Amino acid sequence: MTLATQEKNKKPRKRKPCIGWREWVDFPDFEVENINAKIDTGAKSSAIHAFHIRETMIDGEEHVEFYLHPVQRRKYPEIFCRAPIADRRTIRSSNGQEEERYVIETRLRLGDRTWKIELTLTNRDAMGFRLLLGRDALRRKFLIDPGASYLQSRQD
């Protein structure tokens, strides 16, 4: 087969949607909408601000219960969440400190797309964003324009 024939037989690639350096996202499994997320390609994993984190057993399976503050720089509302523990990992933050964190799996909605991501639970109260989306959550789904913001915000 010639190179020209191979090129003709290739399926056209779907164009990936473009996102900015910050976007509004939802967590349907927790009925949480409109969390302001920082898109961080320098971070491998994703992290959300969680507090009052505790382990619990449900039907013989390890779960983690926690609360979220979905609104930036606000203490209310407080959203109660529960999820099976997917893993525990040592995560090194950007300042070099290591922390043991719970990892959960949950669905994330960004624009018109919904997919499952791994999310680490940590105290991000002092950080600029309550949610950080890293490379693992975004891989092969979007192009990122670091000079733009809220390109996938839904117009309700």
Image (cartoon, helix red, strand yellow):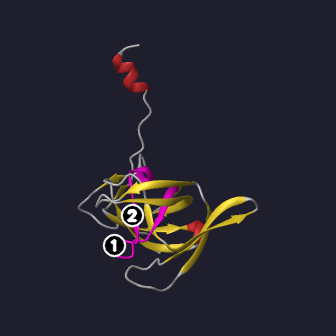
Residue marked by disc 2 = 132
Kind of residue at badge 2: Leu
**Secondary structure beneath disc 2?**
strand
Q: Residue, x 49% and y 72% (percent of image)?
A: 50
Q: Which residue is mark 1?
A: 127
The residue closer to the viewer here, 84 or 97, is 97
> Up-down: is 13 above or below 99?
above
Q: Residue at x 30, y 62 (%)?
A: 21
Q: Is 141 situated left or right of 56 in this image?
A: left
Amino acid tagged 1: Met
The residue lying toward the viewer, choosing from 66 and 34, is 66
Taking the spot 58% from the left edge, 70% from the top edge, the residue there is: 54
Relative to 132, 107 lies left or right: right
Label 2 crowding class (10 Å Cα cut-off): few <14, some 14-19, many 20+? Answer: many
Q: Name the residue located 52 percent from the left edge and 82 percent from the top edge.
A: 78
- Give the extent of the magenta segment: 117-138
Residue 69: which disc? none
- Neighbour tally class for label 1: few under 14, some 14-19, many 20 plus, Cα within 10 Å: few
